[in-house]
Image (tube, helix red, strand yellow):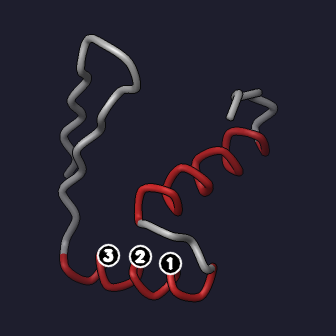
């Protein structure tokens, strides 16, 4: 289950609720990949997925 919240100004904030096992997996992948934060890891994964679908996103 996820809840998405968008603020009106600047960068949008997205709040996610994840079960403990998913959080543990994210933390493990974060360490393996060397990302500085969970948000950096998630954004990198989302950009990669969008790129694989031919959707261009500015960084």
Mark 1 and 3 residues: CB-CB less than 8 Å, in contact?
no
What label sits on residue 30 in the rendered view?
1
Q: Is residue 13 above or below residue 1?
A: above
Q: Is residue 30 above or below residue 1?
A: below
Q: Is residue 33 above or below residue 12?
A: below
Element at label 3: helix
Question: Residue 37: image x %, image y %?
Answer: 44, 67
In the figure, is residue 8 to the left or right of 39? Answer: left
The numbered mark, 1 or 3, whose residue comes first in the sequence reads 3
Mark 1 and 2 residues: CB-CB less than 8 Å, in contact?
yes
Most foreground residue, 50 or 35: 35
Most foreground residue, 44 or 34: 34
What label sits on residue 22 in the rendered view?
3
In the figure, is residue 20 to the left or right of 49? Answer: left
Mark 3 and 2 residues: CB-CB less than 8 Å, in contact?
yes
Question: Residue 11: image x %, image y %?
Answer: 40, 26
Look at mark 2 in the image and give the residue it sits on: 26
Total marks placed: 3
Residue at 30% across, 34% down: 13
The CA span between labels 3 and 2 is: 6 Å
């Amino acid at each position: 289950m996820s809840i998405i919240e968008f603020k009106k100004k600047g960068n949008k904030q997205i709040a996610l609720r994840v079960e403990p096992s998913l959080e543990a997996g994210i933390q493990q992948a974060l360490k393996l990949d060397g990302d500085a934060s969970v948000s950096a890891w998630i954004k990198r994964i989302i950009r990669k997925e969008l790129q694989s679908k031919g959707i261009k996103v500015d960084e």
